[in-house]
Amino acid sequence: MPLNRDQCYQAMLTHDPRFDGHFFVAVRSTRIYCRPICRSKRPALENCEFYRLAAAAEVAGYRPCLRCRPELAPGQSPADSADRLASAAIKQIEAGGLQEQRVSDLASKLGVSERHLRRVLVENVGVTPIQLAQTHKLLLAKQLLTDTTLPIIDVALASGFASLRRFNALFRERYAFSPKTLREKNPNVKHLPSSLPSCFCRLFYRTPFDWSSLLTFFSRRIFAGIEQLEGETYRRTVAIGSHQGWISVENDPVHSALRAEVSISLLPVLMQVLARLRRLFDLEATPKQITMHLGSLANGNPGLRVPGAFDGFEMAIRAILGQQVSVEAATTFAGRLTRHFGRSIETPFPGLTHLAPTASAIAAASEDELTRIGVTKSRARTILAIARAVANGLITLDVAVSIDQALAKLKELPGIGDWTVQYFAMRAFGWPDAFPHSDLGILKALKTKNPRHALAASENWRPWRAYAAMHLWQSLEKNL
């Protein structure tokens, strides 16, 4: 959607946090671009340009502000984009989608031609796929140079650069100074240890943010051996490609950010790890906008988020295991599945012992192997069907240009009905308007036994029905 100059300027003058991450302001006189919350000297409107993405500002020749640090701005919700293809492409690129594949490969994954993908991005956000990827890598590098003590060569690797020389050249070209110059501004660099077992990154969010409710949700659906909750900390093992390791995440409410500790072994896929954490904890939500739309339903807890998925396939298997059984039974089955199909891994945490079973590992199993862990034959057939579809590339659970088409493909699999696909849409695809209207808890909260009545009632909550579902489920828990 086009940006309104006067509205953007007023938001900038008041440092309105509701607009942080939704646009950036570039100042012609300084050739610097900022977040709308920046406290630098107020520029005149005639000196300002406004951009939806940081990449568009950089392509126009502006450098990121060292004070407000655009790389720390919260991301945009899928509902912010007028074009679903542009939104899906941006999310894929921000998750490292062009690190190991070409633009043509990404376009094919999204179901369009390379030329069409480039045209859509230029029309919607003013940049090409390559320009967007370059900016995202540079901003991640800027954060790591400022907030960590990682050696510069490791920063380049973690940011998706295959060459230190190329990293230095592009950084200097865009920002007019070298990575080393920025690193020297980091007071921690003097205390750089010879080796580091992990690095820390901050992931910012818009307030309010209910961290406790997210942890409660995950604790009831834990994948034992893969995930661990200890106090207010979430931990899990990670395998992306040939890289494996662990992450540990805590909330930092003072700075409105999550503090993620990532094992050094995951540096080559750090961009993917951070993108998955944003999805898992729904960090791109706009809580004040959502609460205003949902009204009294959300007033009791405006910081409630929709729990996402670190890995879409892993979440799908956990959801299928939970069909028509208790939460405790599903957790038991998940633990058995992990021990049987997941690879073991050593971590600093006793509770993290395995990597999540891959689609290919489960796809190669027999129905009898699955029934031996306790699931029914029909459930085993469903698990095998989705594992084989994912392993063969027939479906994907990490991106959807058309939600309707993605869900229709899922419903072709045995044992996958309306409730399951809507639940997948909520958590795996991060679709804010998903609504499992046949869910017994939602029916109970709405005081009806007719799913069609629940669906009709949900129309008033579009396009935030996934958040409405979370509030309805939470209302039941409060009344227990």
Image (spheres, grey):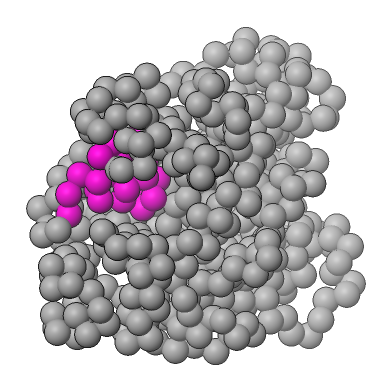
Residue 403 left/right relative to 142: left
Residue 461 coordinates in the image, percent (x, y): 40, 24
Q: In this rendering, does residue 386 appear at all? A: yes
In depth, the one of 406 and 10 nearer the eye is 406
14 above or below 448? above
In depth, the one of 175 and 445 nearer the eye is 445
413 above or below 304? below
The answer to whether residue 426 is magenta is yes
Residue 303 left/right relative to 468: right
Q: Quadrant of residue 98?
A: bottom left
Seen at 26% across and 73% down, the residue is 359
Residue 259 coordinates in the image, percent (x, y): 69, 59
Extent of the magenta region: 416-438
Q: In this rendering, does residue 96 appear at all? A: no
Q: Quadrant of residue 43?
A: top right
Seen at 76% across and 14% down, the residue is 44
Seen at 70% across and 33% down, the residue is 34
Seen at 64% across and 59% down, the residue is 141
The answer to whether residue 437 is magenta is yes
Q: Quadrant of residue 251?
A: bottom right
381 above or below 108? below
Count the numbered circles shown. Answer: 0
Residue 216 left/right relative to 192: left
Residue 245 coordinates in the image, percent (x, y): 53, 79
In depth, the one of 376 and 8 nearer the eye is 376
Query: In the rendered image, which quarter contains the N terminus?
Result: top left
In depth, the one of 357 and 391 nearer the eye is 357
Residue 185 coordinates in the image, percent (x, y): 85, 57
